[in-house]
Image: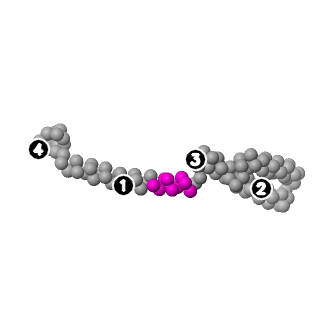
Amino acid sequence: MRTIPEIHAEIERLSEVRGELWQQLSYGRQQALVDEIKHIDEQLLTLWDEHRAERARIRFGERDDIVRQNGKATRGKRRCDRGLSASFLAKEKNRAPIERNGTRMEADDPA
């Protein structure tokens, strides 16, 4: 895995080459130049993706660790949500209706 300065250096180098190719292309269209520019553009996209991934790794840690931790947190949250749902439904079951015979009633009023 490359460092951010190494990635930046490669991006700078390819950007300079691409600029020179565009300059040559301005004198007249040549399919070989167009193809080379497209190839360099693809390389630059790959480098920027690598740059973003490296910055994320530095900031948040290794991807596998994040995925593993997120999976544990999600499982725990699902268990918690199931418990809360069951608790909520039990409370709702025991509540008095809000409206009965056209008269508004509080939830704590006896039926």
Of discs 1 and 4, which sits in the foreground? 1
Of discs 2 and 1, which sits in the foreground? 1
Q: Which mark is residue 111?
A: 4
Whether residue 45 is visible here, answered yes or no, is no
Q: CA distance from mark 2 to mark 3?
A: 30 Å
The amino acid beneath tag 3 is Phe
Q: Is residue 69 magenta?
A: yes
Q: Nearer the viewer, residue 14 or 7?
A: 7
The amino acid beneath tag 2 is Ile
Q: Which residues are magenta?
A: 64-72
Q: Quadrant of residue 75?
A: bottom left
Residue on which the image places disc 2: 40
Q: At which x and y percent is residue 2?
A: 72, 52
**Quarter of the figure that contains the N terminus:** bottom right
* Left or right of 15 in this view: 82: left
Callout 4: helix, strand or loop? loop
Against 9, is 36 above or below? Answer: below
